[in-house]
């Protein structure tokens, strides 16, 4: 009898613990599931982090180089705007990246208030796997001295292109220099659908169609020109 009561009590406690956990937002749509993995950190939400990276890159490309789709140029423009505090997130964030942010916010280990928790297991995994040694040393020095800020870390990124080859570095940039900044934006009156890229019409050669110009009609020669008249 005592064993049965104990088992019932144990089931009740387990159920109570699960019901007391904060609800985690689920991302309804993964648009980049077919892309290569971004990080391997066994966080339980590596797939969400991967989605966050590719969606971030899509946002900045559409914002800063929609015509050429040059990812490196878009990164440089965004990093420069982080340093000069001119990112205009209200004109960059799309409904998909906002949904990703809402899901990321429920990962309590990822945050320390409104900024990333640089000492969390997942962020340590990402930073430890960065390939650019000087940037990694700079980042670790900023974190260890409690001096880390997005703006300070953005400065050395200005002269680097490692993020184009290193998905761990690119992921850190996405999380710290992009998604963490959403905490400072009031999205309640922002129409995020206005930031969705509009595809330009293309012709058969995959070139943007230029507006057609009205063709001038050839000037007709005057049959009477040059003839004298009485």
Image (spheres, rainbow, N blue to C red):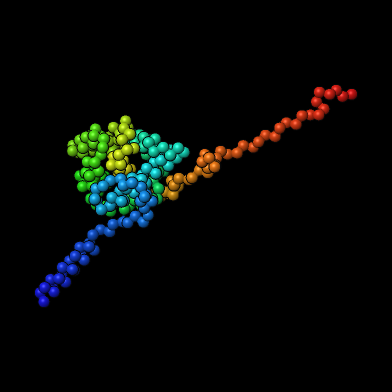
Q: Nearer the viewer, residue 34 or 145?
A: 34
On the rendered structure, is 10 left or right of 166? left
Q: Quadrant of residue 146?
A: top left
Please give the name of the residue rendered at 31% of the width and 51% of the height, measured from the top-left corner: 48
Q: Quadrant of residue 153?
A: top left
Height in image: 45 above or below 64?
Answer: below
> Can residue 167 be seen in the rendering of this structure?
yes
> Can residue 186 be seen in the rendering of this structure?
no
Q: Position of residue 41 (x, y in %)?
A: 24, 48
Please give the name of the residue rendered at 24% of the width and 63% of the height, measured from the top-left corner: 19
Q: Position of residue 225 (x, y in %)?
A: 80, 25
On the rendered structure, is 117 left or right of 188? left
Q: Residue furthest right?
A: 230
On the rendered structure, is 32 left or right of 108? right
Q: Residue furthest left?
A: 2
In the picture, which quadrant includes the N terminus?
bottom left
Q: Quadrant of residue 139?
A: top left
Q: Nearer the viewer, residue 62 or 43?
A: 43
Q: Position of residue 4 (x, y in %)?
A: 13, 74
Height in image: 225 above or below 122?
Answer: above
Height in image: 225 above or below 106?
Answer: above
Please give the name of the residue rendered at 48% of the width and 45% of the height, measured from the top-left corner: 198
Q: Position of residue 171 (x, y in %)?
A: 30, 43
């Amino acid at each position: 009898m005592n064993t049965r009561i104990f088992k019932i009590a144990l089931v009740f406690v387990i159920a109570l613990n699960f019901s007391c956990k904060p609800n985690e937002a689920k991302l309804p749509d993964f648009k980049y599931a077919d892309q290569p993995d971004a990080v391997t950190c066994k966080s339980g939400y590596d797939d969400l982090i991967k989605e966050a990276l590719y969606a971030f890159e899509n946002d900045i490309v559409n914002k800063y180089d929609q015509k050429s789709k040059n990812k490196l140029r878009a990164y440089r423009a965004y990093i420069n705007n982080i340093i000069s505090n001119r990112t205009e997130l209200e004109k960059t964030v799309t409904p998909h990246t906002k949904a990703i942010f809402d899901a990321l916010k429920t990962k309590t280990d990822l945050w320390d208030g409104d900024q990333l928790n640089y000492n969390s297991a997942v962020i340590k995994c990402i930073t430890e796997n960065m390939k650019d040694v000087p940037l990694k040393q700079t980042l670790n020095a900023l974190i260890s001295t409690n001096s880390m800020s997005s703006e300070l870390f953005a400065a050395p990124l200005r002269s680097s292109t490692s993020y184009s080859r290193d998905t761990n570095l690119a992921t850190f940039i996405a999380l710290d220099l992009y998604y963490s900044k959403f905490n400072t934006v009031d999205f309640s009156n922002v129409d995020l659908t206005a930031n969705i890229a509009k595809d330009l019409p293309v012709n058969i050669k995959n070139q943007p169609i230029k507006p057609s110009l009205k063709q001038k009609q050839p000037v007709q020669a005057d049959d009477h020109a040059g003839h004298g008249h009485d």
